[in-house]
Image (cartoon, rainbow, N blue to C red):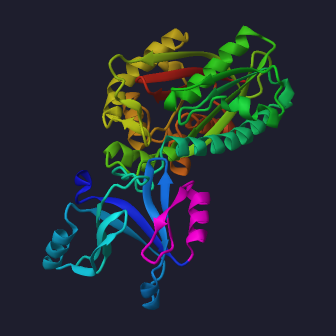
């Protein structure tokens, strides 16, 4: 227990209905429980486990506390190397001893304390008995890789069905007319991939070609659409479905005080978008080509760090000034590869990575105020949904009438800028 001295490490629910509480938290949070000996009243004590291991317990409210009107409550245990000494010290500092130090057989020595404001907490020095592991620090109910990815799979499959079905219907096609699927997603792992999981549910053929793409981040909307375009051109009669799905919210990390994690929690959202791409008739727009700029030695500007509790966002505050300094040259280089120039582009269709990112794009490319109004609208209404976001901007452009030449751009891990040239149909 020495490494837990002075830290909250164990959380306990006292309730009048332990069985009901176990069912509730198992259903809602996926916690598992197992009996561990008896509480002080001789009733069963249930140890709670999450993806990070054992982290607390559920027990019935002791009779004497119930008689004094105590209702259900959650309490936290602070590790103590010497419960008696710490109880005396805390009492002398203005706290109160609510229950004098005593031993819990097979568990450890504990005391119930309150701070000067009356808030209750417990001290505990554990005996580390067989069958009851010490919970690791920060294990207080946070969900780890398994739980987060289960949510990703559940949400992403539902979003896939909704977005893909709408795109196929809008294209005037039946699902069995789709020859291939490009699936772009970076916020979870799916093996088998998402289109394999839901293809039969939406009516895709059993010989449909599948191209799952991971790791593109916010650039995935543009890069995914460009990939589908190249595949359609390679087989002129084929029809390709591109679907991009991101569930950024499952990567919210309450165990982290990293400023990037705080910014990501406020900025990012969940979303999905889809489009049908063919090399034949064009109903909405023509894809004229794509290009990309990858800057060397910029891998720590944006991306994921893979950690045990889940994905940790890499989101450098240098992104806006970097864009302001580097974007103009990158756009000029991409335009040259696409056989055009910046002054021949009627409108940009940009991934709105954040307000400061939009501001940086406007400054870098010397755009007039209001030229990226649709990008700001999408960011305001939906947040940064990563890869799908730029396709939400494109949808707004299509509804108001696509200009003759549009350059789509999106930044992503690498650090990279993906570009694609569109012409009105």
Q: How many marks?
A: 0
Q: Residue at x 85, y 24 (%)?
A: 177
Task: Give residue 179's quadrant in the image.
Answer: top right
User: What's drawn in magenta, residue-wise?
Assistant: 17-45
Residue pictured at 61% horizontal, 34% vertical: 391
Question: In the image, residue 424 lies at what x, y percent?
Answer: 68, 25
Q: Position of residue 13 (x, y in %)?
A: 46, 69
As for residue 42 lying within the magenta part, the answer is yes
For residue 98, above or below residue 256: below
In the image, is 91 to the left or to the right of 315?
left
Q: Residue at x 55, y 36 (%)?
A: 188
**Magenta residue check for 233:** no
Pick the front one: 53 or 236: 53
Furthest-bottom residue in this view: 68
Image position, residue 29 (x, y; %): 55, 56
The N terminus lies in which quarter of the figure? bottom left
Res 365 visible: yes
Which quarter of the figure has residue 209? top right
Relative to 183, is 255 above or below? below
Q: Nearer the viewer, residue 153 or 258?
A: 153
Residue 76 picture location, percent across and down: 36, 66
Asked if one can make out residue 405 in the rendered structure from this viewpoint, the answer is no
Position of the C terminus, as image quadrant, is: top right
């Amino acid at each position: 227990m020495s490494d837990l001295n002075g830290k909250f490490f164990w959380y306990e629910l006292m309730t009048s209905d332990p069985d009901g509480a176990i069912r509730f938290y198992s259903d809602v949070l996926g916690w598992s429980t197992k009996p561990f000996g008896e509480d002080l009243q001789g009733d069963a004590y249930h140890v709670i486990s999450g993806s990070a291991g054992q982290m607390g317990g559920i027990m019935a409210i002791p009779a004497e506390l119930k008689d004094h009107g105590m209702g259900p409550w959650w309490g936290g245990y602070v590790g103590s190397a010497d419960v008696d000494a710490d109880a005396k010290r805390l009492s002398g500092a203005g706290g109160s001893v609510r229950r004098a130090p005593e031993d819990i057989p097979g568990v450890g020595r504990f005391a119930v304390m309150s701070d000067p404001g009356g808030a209750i907490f417990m001290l505990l020095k554990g005996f580390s008995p067989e069958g009851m592991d010490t919970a690791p620090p920060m294990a207080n109910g946070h969900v780890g890789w398994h739980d987060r990815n289960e949510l990703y799979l559940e949400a992403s499959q539902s979003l896939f069905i909704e977005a893909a079905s709408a795109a196929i219907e809008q294209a005037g096609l039946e699902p069995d007319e789709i020859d291939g699927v490009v699936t772009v997603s970076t916020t979870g792992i799916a093996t088998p991939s998402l289109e394999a999981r839901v293809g039969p549910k939406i009516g895709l053929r059993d010989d449909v070609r599948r191209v799952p793409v991971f790791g593109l981040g916010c650039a995935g909307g543009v890069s995914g659409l460009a990939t589908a375009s190249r595949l359609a051109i390679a087989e002129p009669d084929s029809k390709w479905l591109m679907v991009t799905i991101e569930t950024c919210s499952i990567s919210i990390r309450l165990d982290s005080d990293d400023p990037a994690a705080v910014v990501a929690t406020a900025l990012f959202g969940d979303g999905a978008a889809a489009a049908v791409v063919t090399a034949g008739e064009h109903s909405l727009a023509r894809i004229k080509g794509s290009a990309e700029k990858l800057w060397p030695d910029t891998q720590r500007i944006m991306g994921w760090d893979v950690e045990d509790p889940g994905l940790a966002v890499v989101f450098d505050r240098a992104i806006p000034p970097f864009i302001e300094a580097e974007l103009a040259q990158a756009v000029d280089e991409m335009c040259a590869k696409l056989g055009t120039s910046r002054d021949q582009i009627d409108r940009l269709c940009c991934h709105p990575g954040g307000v400061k990112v939009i501001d940086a794009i406007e400054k870098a490319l010397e755009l007039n105020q209001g030229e990226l109004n649709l990008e700001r609208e999408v960011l305001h209404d939906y947040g940064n949904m990563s890869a799908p976001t730029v396709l939400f901007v494109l949808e707004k452009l299509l509804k108001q009438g696509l200009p003759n030449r549009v350059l789509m751009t999106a930044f992503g891990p690498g650090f990279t800028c993906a570009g694609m040239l569109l012409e009105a149909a």
